[in-house]
Image (spheres, rainbow, N blue to C red):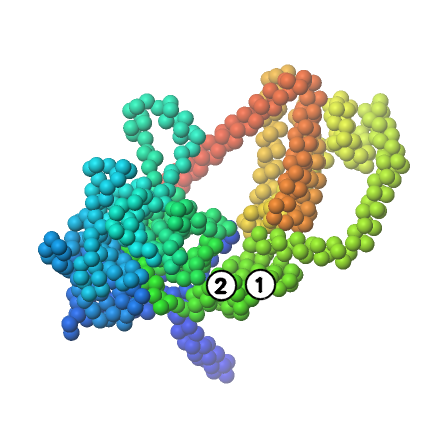
């Protein structure tokens, strides 16, 4: 009977597994990673925003009833307003025009008639179509831009630019081309670092556009001043950054991708004056991947080679290093990431260009000679539609879409932020605070918090005023009645002649007496044993707890540390270790400088000195919950006051226990800091040596085990 039951359960489990297996495969069927970054730049894997629909290649394209043949090293492609696709088939020296079904070849342009006679292309690198339907071809090795009508009729050349800003030996080699609504031509040319070349509608060179100036640090300026001529010749040249791709939106703003070795900003949005007006989002990063390795074939920051403006402020960047596609909204928020390198269908070997048409993203691969066509998934469509509604000002209409996004991806910060802003617009500050906090949106969270705070204060003003009055009364009572009696009792304890050990309560009172009367307090710690080493160590422990709790629980308005990354035990151990090293360093220095204090006195002084920092750290953590953006000064003032007072107490304490002058104390503390660094350096050196010895002995042991 038991065997029958077991067999029955096994068969049921197997059937359930078989039913779930297709779903699991569907979720992981993409041959590339799909992910995003959270507020702290942790990688969060997401549902796929796009999936491969189909691929276009020379084998799938039909020209006059037969396959077109191999697309040889294509470099660029574009769409016209009628949906026709133009491919710069660079290796075959031609431009291929494809119908909107992406299957039928309408025409092949490999030659044209000009006033000088028949002409051909030589490595056409870039193509663009103007609003009036004219085709612009960057005929790179013929050093010209060719302008043709839809039927291939020659219109004009854009070539041989002249100007004071160009060298006499300059050779014009166009690589990418784009045209705005006024038929101004924007060209990315080889070996041009001054910016994008701009030509008028007549083909005349008018200057450079959007130059990216390289900032040189003060140290680099000083170093170059001090370097010899030979050394300067070997140093890196500080030249403007080179552009890699270009696109123009319907309003005439130019989106241009550029080489970025820092991984910070690989795209610009240039206004008609050539000024970069792009928004960089809360993370201040438009460089693609924010986390990457430092070794290997795919190491280093993203190598952005092209950009495409889509609609509603959305634009996508193409990374040639890891084959990723990064999509941003008009505020610079990263919406989603997908794509990868490889030989599987849907991955790339050498992606060089990206385009957008009918809700689909298309990527041109130079080595494969193919175009991968990606279609929106439910997840990608929801995000795109929600961002479009927000761009158009319909924030409330986007809420259902964002909620669906959260159903698919509960960690999506942009969705939480979008819902929070909708609640904020509707006046629902309570819900706005919840969603904006999840979305890590400091700016709008602060707006909602200020409104909520005003509501709470206005509805509880009587209680607030009553609390203020009671607080003032308590201060007066303390000043007039309790404080004098306590001070008298503390002085009585201090002036006792006998060197008997104080009771526990008296030692705690003496701790606070020392904080407010450091000169006398630290003096009697040294000369009449009034301090308590255990209380001092407890203060260090309490500061370690307060410090760690501040890093975890301080409001995200003032605290940019991920709470999950804080290891409470490790941080407390680090504070205690630093305390011991600081005391050992000071004791080592003062022994050589005729200091009278004992090691116990130093431990006590530094421990007692941390009391102000304990109180202000706890108070600042509480205060941080009540401040909004642009009010952080209250938090930082509290932290600064506590640190300053603790340093003053430490200075006075060291001066008293060692019987130093102020000048000698300052010198001692400076040398102490140097000694601390030396101790840490030696400790790391010893640890590294021990680790290497252990590794050596372990390898020998392993070798002996294998040999025997």
Q: Is residue 370 left or right of residue 534?
A: left
Nearer-the-camera pick, 621 or 369: 369
Instruction: Determine the residue positioned at 81% across, 54% down.
Output: 462
Q: Is residue 15 left or right of residue 83?
A: right
**x, y percentage for residue 121?**
16, 55
Q: Is residue 180 left or right of residue 660?
A: left
**x, y percentage for residue 363?**
30, 60
Look at mark 2 in the image and give the residue it sits on. 392
Task: Sort mark 1 into few (<14), some (14-19) or many (20+) by Cα contacts within 10 Å.
Answer: many
Residue 422 shows which numbered tag? Answer: 1
As drawn, 178 above or below 475: below
Residue 390 shows which numbered tag? Answer: none
Secondary structure beneath label 2:
loop
Secondary structure beneath label 1:
helix
Marks 1 and 2, how far apart at CA: 14 Å
Q: Number of labelled discs?
A: 2
Q: Which sits earlier in the primary sequence, circle 1 or circle 2?
A: 2
**x, y percentage for residue 437?**
59, 56
As drawn, 559 above or below 645: below
Instruction: Determine the residue positioned at 44% across, 61% down.
Output: 312
Residue 537 visible? The answer is: no
Nearer-the-camera pick, 34 or 88: 88
Q: Is residue 343 left or right of residue 68?
A: right
Instruction: Determine the residue positioned at 86% across, 39% down.
Output: 476
Nearer-the-camera pick, 646 or 606: 646
Instruction: Determine the residue positioned at 41% across, 39% down.
Output: 695
């Amino acid at each position: 009977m038991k065997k029958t039951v077991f067999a029955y359960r096994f068969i049921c489990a197997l059937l359930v597994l078989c039913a779930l297996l297709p779903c699991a495969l569907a979720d992981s069927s993409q041959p590339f990673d799909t992910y995003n970054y959270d507020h702290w730049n942790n990688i969060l894997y997401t549902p796929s925003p796009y999936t491969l629909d189909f691929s276009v290649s020379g084998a799938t394209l039909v020209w006059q009833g037969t396959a077109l043949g191999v697309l040889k090293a294509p470099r660029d492609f574009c769409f016209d307003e009628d949906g026709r696709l133009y491919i710069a088939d660079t290796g075959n020296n031609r431009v291929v025009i494809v119908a909107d079904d992406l299957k039928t070849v309408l025409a092949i342009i490999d030659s044209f008639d000009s006033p000088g006679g028949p002409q051909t292309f030589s490595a056409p690198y870039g193509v663009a179509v103007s609003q009036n339907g004219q085709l612009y071809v960057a005929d790179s090795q013929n050093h010209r831009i060719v302008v043709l009508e839809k039927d291939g009729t020659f219109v004009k050349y854009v070539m041989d630019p002249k100007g004071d800003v160009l060298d006499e030996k300059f050779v014009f080699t166009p690589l990418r081309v784009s045209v705005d609504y006024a038929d101004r031509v924007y060209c990315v040319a080889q070996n041009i670092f001054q910016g994008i070349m701009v030509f008028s509608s007549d083909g005349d060179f008018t200057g450079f556009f959007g130059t990216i100036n390289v900032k040189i640090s003060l140290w680099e300026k000083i170093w170059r001043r001090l370097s010899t001529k030979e050394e300067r010749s070997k140093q890196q040249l500080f030249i403007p950054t080179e552009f890699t791709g270009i696109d123009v939106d319907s309003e005439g703003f130019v989106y241009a991708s550029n080489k970025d070795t820092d991984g910070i900003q690989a795209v610009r949005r240039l206004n008609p004056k050539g000024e970069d007006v792009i928004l960089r989002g809360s993370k201040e990063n438009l460089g693609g991947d924010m986390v990457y390795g430092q070794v290997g074939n795919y190491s280093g920051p993203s190598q952005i080679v092209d950009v495409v403006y889509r609609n509603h402020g959305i634009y996508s960047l193409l990374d040639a290093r890891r084959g990723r596609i990064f999509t941003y909204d008009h505020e610079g928020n990263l919406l989603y990431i997908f794509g990868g390198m490889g030989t599987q269908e849907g991955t790339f070997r050498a992606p060089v260009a990206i385009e957008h048409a009918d809700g689909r993203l298309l990527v041109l691969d130079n080595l494969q000679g193919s175009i991968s066509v990606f279609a929106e998934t439910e997840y990608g469509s929801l995000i795109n539609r929600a961002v479009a509604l927000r761009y158009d000002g319909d924030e409330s209409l986007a809420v259902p879409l964002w909620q669906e996004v959260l159903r698919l991806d509960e960690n999506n910060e942009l969705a939480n932020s979008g819902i929070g802003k909708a609640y904020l617009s509707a006046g629902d500050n309570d819900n706005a605070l919840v969603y904006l906090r999840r979305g890590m949106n400091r700016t709008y969270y602060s707006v909602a918090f200020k409104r909520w705070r005003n509501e709470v204060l206005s509805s509880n003003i009587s209680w607030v005023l009553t609390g203020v009055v009671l607080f003032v009364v308590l201060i007066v009572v303390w000043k007039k009645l309790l404080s004098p009696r306590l001070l008298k009792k503390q002085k009585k304890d201090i002036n006792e002649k006998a060197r008997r050990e104080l009771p526990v309560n008296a030692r705690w009172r003496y701790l606070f007496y020392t904080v407010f009367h450091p000169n006398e307090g630290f003096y009697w710690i040294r000369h009449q044993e009034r301090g308590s080493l255990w209380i001092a160590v407890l203060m260090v422990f309490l500061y370690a707890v307060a410090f760690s709790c501040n890093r975890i629980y301080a409001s995200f308005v003032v605290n940019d540390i991920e709470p999950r990354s804080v290891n409470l035990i490790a941080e407390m151990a680090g504070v205690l270790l630093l305390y011991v090293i600081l005391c050992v360093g000071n004791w080592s220095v003062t022994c050589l400088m005729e200091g009278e204090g004992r090691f116990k006195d130093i431990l006590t002084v530094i421990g007692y000195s941390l009391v102000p920092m304990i109180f202000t750290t706890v108070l600042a953590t509480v205060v941080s919950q009540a401040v909004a953006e642009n009010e952080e000064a209250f938090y930082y003032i509290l932290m600064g006051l506590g640190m300053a007072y603790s340093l003053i107490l430490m200075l006075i304490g060291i001066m008293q226990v060692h019987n130093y002058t102020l000048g000698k104390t300052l010198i001692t503390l400076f040398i102490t800091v140097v000694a601390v660094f030396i101790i840490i350096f030696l400790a790391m050196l010893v640890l590294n040596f021990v680790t290497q010895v252990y590794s050596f002995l372990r390898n020998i042991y392993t070798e002996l085990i294998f040999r025997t």
